[in-house]
Image: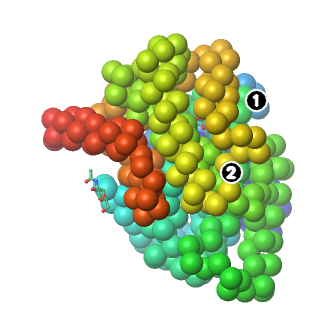
């Protein structure tokens, strides 16, 4: 198949998560270019070496590898159908949309945000109001153990849907809606061909809040309990109770924002169910925020905690635990980032 007939994907963030999606999309028949940072030399020379429980071992050689957006645009004589953003969202370090500076993004290119947190889309919507934005949450267990060397477990799921900016309710443009729907389905065909568990959701914000129940609690609490993994946290009755209480706050804000329950069963059962699932896993989970803390990297507190707290304030919901956690996380981060300077 020539490049012209292929769906063309540009992937920003060629780390542990991005490389797995890039690999699967290429296996699914897409043309996949990757913009790499620290692993550029290795990936350019020989691609990614991937060890995956689900897919077996493989060598993912992207169709093109670049150092920057401007290089990608200069060297690709076609328009990308989708740009996948697989980086952390750190608006306090720089505007997340700055990632696309130099990319001269065409209005017909779909921007797919595979990131954690709440309100991560607004940064891109402000700069690219005319592009279709797809908001996605990924469930995947993967890590980069060495430059370009990826170890992946058993799960790869992508749940996604159209980003609908607040206040846009009501004025739905049927033509645009049909086009956007077709673009969602085209992405789905690519993912399914690459054997990725893929689900298009009508209400992606409900799913984002659902994921935030873990991310806004287990992530920061793992840092604040001295760098504890999931088992260490949840087998300690005091910390477990704190996690449950914090989860209840996130649930109440999320339900007020999406104006419906987050699950199809009673909300008060969510914390114990999530904790039960976590404890059933063979291996303890090391939350990504804890890894950032250990390696003295910036943490995703703005999109995982602060954006949720801002909603709570706007809606008049009390979230004393989330606010306490947020303050302590900021203090912890400020201390080690200053020392690292
Ligand atoms: C991050 O940015 C937000 C929005 O501008 C601001 O409210 C918040 O205080 C900032 N956080 C830090 C740690 O500077
Ligand atoms: C978020 O939560 C998911 C589980 O829902 C977990 O796998 C992931 O490590 C967490 N990541 C971050 C950045 O919070």
**51 and 332: which is toward the camera:** 332
**Residue under the point 36% across and 22% down:** 225
Q: Position of residue 80 (x, y in %)?
A: 64, 69
Asked if marks 2 and 1 touch (Cβ < 8 Å), the reply is: no
**305 and 13: which is toward the camera:** 305
Pointer 2 or 1: first along the chain: 1
Distance between the Cα atoms at labels 2 and 1? Answer: 33 Å
**Residue under the point 67% across and 28% down:** 273
Q: Position of residue 36 (x, y in %)?
A: 48, 50
Return the residue at label 1. 54
Q: Position of residue 22 (x, y in %)?
A: 65, 49
Residue 29 visible in image:
yes
Picture quarter with the N terminus:
bottom right
Q: Secondary structure at mark 1?
A: loop
* Crowdedness near tag 2: few (<14), some (14–19) or many (≥20) residues, C-alpha within 10 Å: some
**Residue under the point 57% across and 78% down:** 167
User: Is the residue 54 above or below the residue 31 in the image?
Assistant: above
Q: Secondary structure at mark 2?
A: loop
Return the residue at label 2. 261
**95 and 79: which is toward the camera:** 95
């Amino acid at each position: 198949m020539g490049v012209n007939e292929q769906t063309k994907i540009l992937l920003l963030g060629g780390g542990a998560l991005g490389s797995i999606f890039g690999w699967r999309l290429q296996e699914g028949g897409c043309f996949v270019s990757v913009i790499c940072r620290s692993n550029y030399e290795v990936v350019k020379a020989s691609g990614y070496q991937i060890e995956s429980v689900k897919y077996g071992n493989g060598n993912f050689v992207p169709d093109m590898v670049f150092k920057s957006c401007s290089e990608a645009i200069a060297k690709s004589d076609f328009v990308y159908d989708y740009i996948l953003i697989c980086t952390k969202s750190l608006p306090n370090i720089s505007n997340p949309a700055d990632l696309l500076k130099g990319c001269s993004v065409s209005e017909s290119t779909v921007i797919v945000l595979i990131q954690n947190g709440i309100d991560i889309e607004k940064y891109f919507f402000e700069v690219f109001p005319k592009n279709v934005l797809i908001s996605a949450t990924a469930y995947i267990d993967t890590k980069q153990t060495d430059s370009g060397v990826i170890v992946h477990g058993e799960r790869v799921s992508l749940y996604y849907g159209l980003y609908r900016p607040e206040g846009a309710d009501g004025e739905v443009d049927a033509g645009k809606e049909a086009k956007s729907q077709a673009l969602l389905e085209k992405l789905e065909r690519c993912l399914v061909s690459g054997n990725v568990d893929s689900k298009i959701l009508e209400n992606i914000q409900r799913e984002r809040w659902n994921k935030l129940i873990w991310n806004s609690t287990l992530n920061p609490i793992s840092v604040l309990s001295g760098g504890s993994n999931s088992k260490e946290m949840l087998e300690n009755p005091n910390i477990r109770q704190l996690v449950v209480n914090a989860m209840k706050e996130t649930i109440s804000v999320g339900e007020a924002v999406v104006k419906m329950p987050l699950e199809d069963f009673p909300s008060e059962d969510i914390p114990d169910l999530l904790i039960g699932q976590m404890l059933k896993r063979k291996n303890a989970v090391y939350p990504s925020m804890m890894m950032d803390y250990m390696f003295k990297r910036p943490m995703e507190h703005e999109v995982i905690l602060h954006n949720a707290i801002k909603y709570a304030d706007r809606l008049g919901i009390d979230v004393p635990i989330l606010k306490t956690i947020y303050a302590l996380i900021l203090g912890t981060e400020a201390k080690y980032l200053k020392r690292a300077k």
